[in-house]
Image (cartoon, coloured by chain):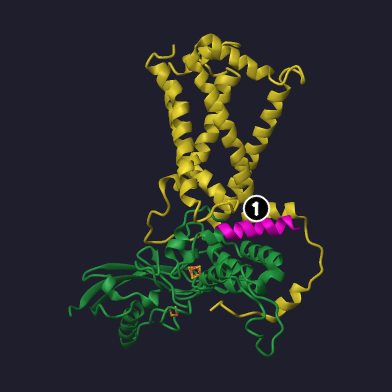
Chain colours: A yellow, B green
Amino acid sequence: MTGAFIPLDVMASATDTGRRPSSLRVLWRSTIGKKTVMAVSGGILLLYLIVHMLGNLKIFAGSTSFNEYAEWLRVFGEPALGEGWLLWVVRVVLLTAVIAHIVAAWQLSRLDIRARPVKYAHGRRRATYATRTMRWGGVIIALFVVWHILDLTTGHVNPLGEEGRPYENVVATFSTWYGNTIYIVAMLALGLHIRHGFWSAAQTLGVNHPRRDRALKATATGLAVALTVGFVSVPIAVMTGIVS
Amino acid sequence: MTLMKLTLRIWRQAGPDEPGAMTTYELDGVSPEMSFLEMLDTLNERLSAEGEEPVAFDHDCREGICGSCGMVINGDAHGPERTTACQLHMRSFSDGDVIDIEPWRAGAFPVIKDLVVDRSAFDRIIGAGGYITAPTGSAPEAHATAVPKEAADLAFENAECIGCGACVAACPNGSAMLFTAAKVVHLNALPQGAPERESRTREMVAAMDAEGFGGCTNVGECATACPKGIPLFSITRMNREYLRALRKG
Ligand code: SF4
Ligand code: FES
């Protein structure tokens, strides 16, 4: 029914010479553009998470080594740059990525919900678990990040909260039942989020291809499992006394 | 041949702004050879005879090529088989089944009556760029424009879209990405579509967004429901085309 029908005014609009809004504007206004913003910001956050997770594993090298590493994170970039400069650059990039990711997700979700105002009477489960939990999983991860910063960056809610002793603070958090629960639940949500998010980003950026699909899905699963296992290994190590 | 007795629960809505509800009908003597629409015809004959309003549904060719028919059957757009509702046969069901029949549900596809929805949003997306500009008149020499085999295959695969709207109906976000992608990929693949490649992509995506369809979250339900097998990768291609079009300004 929609196949070949071309209204006449279309021909006229093809010759319009009106000024077009800038590409960036068009990008942000379109659904595909907002998804591109989500894909790129998600990619930045994913890179950060990989580095973060690998850094966390230093905890298995003992208190001195871990605390020295944590101290180095504060000063890296010196002496070319001032103390903490590079750290702040990283923080600003991450914060920008987080805000862009959340704002785009929020706006897209509202559009999506409005596009299906009446639900089916005969509902059925659509999409995989990882896909269905993107929104709530994202909310869980965002809440976790707030807690995580208050716990281990500023120390406000840490049971020990001693500055300059991150190793001991980590052990203190994971010696509480709630610390372990919050952390492990959030890391499982993170794994699921990455499982769908990584592949979905490849779709959105148009880099997926029938011949590449399986490899991309396998990479997504691999990254999700590696990050979840890597992160969760720390509370497990504290719980089992490997790290104390 | 055993005839079936079915319980049908059908969305009845008298008009665009009327309230609607699922209404239950018992239907006897359904043969497995009937198409799904013939089954509904049988019900409608009875309803007419009883002085009731028959169930309104769209249909035309009844051979799976026009894209007019379409209804959500037990939660699946076009029902359990990968085909159109008119090409679905009652042998896919068994005696005693309860079948829920609903219209496409999307903000951009308002219900007109019962199972009939207004799909003119699709026409406006096509109108925004789903065409090529070419001089009309006598047919051009067949060898004047060479089309590489790969491009021809890709174009054919995507040209199969019949505009039924099952992709929108199946998508949890009511997104029209698969439909729009089918046309963008079809025309952008061909040399005849090249002059308008960027503007087509930009305008069709803008028209799609303006109609209030949702965004793609890569669930894949559209491609599963599509009776013509338009692949999910067409969406990937359209995303690539869109970003390319924006880079070109
Ligand atoms: S893409 Fe498939 S499901 Fe969507 S309108 Fe075209 S034929 Fe129908
Ligand atoms: S009536 Fe034409 S496709 Fe079903």
Provide the secondary structure element on which disc 1 rests. Answer: helix
Name the residue at 64% across, 38% down: A97
**Residue B89 higher or lower than A217, as above or below:** below
Q: Report the span colored magenta.
A: B236-249
Q: Nearer the viewer, residue A118 or B30?
A: B30
Tally the marks: 1
Q: Is residue B11 visible?
A: yes
Q: For the residue marked with disc 1, what is the amino acid?
A: Gly
Rendering quarter of residue A43: top right
Question: In which quadrant of the rendered image does the N terminus of chain B lie?
Answer: bottom left
Please say whether residue B21 is one of the residues in the magenta stretch: no
The image quadrant in which ligand 2 is located: bottom left
**Where the C terminus of chain B falls, by quadrant?**
bottom right
Residue A213 to residue A56: above or below: below
Please tell me which residue is depicted at 25% across the width and 79% down the height of the picture. B30
Q: Residue furthest top?
A: A64
Relative image position of residue B236 (x, y in whole percent): 56, 57
The furthest residue to the bottom: B138
What residue is shown with label 1?
A: A33
Q: Which image quadrant for residue B108?
A: bottom right
Percent x, y for residue B247?
Answer: 72, 55
Q: Position of residue A53 (x, y in %)?
A: 52, 27
Compare residues B119 and B166 and report the one nearer the observer: B166
Residue A123: where, in percent of width, then height?
Answer: 38, 58
Q: Does residue B121 lie above or below A175 as drawn? A: below
Camera-nearest residue between B204 and B14? B204
The answer to if B237 sits in the magenta stretch is yes
Main secondary structure found in the magenta portion: helix
Q: Is residue A142 left or right of residue B131?
A: left
Q: Is residue A161 visible?
A: no
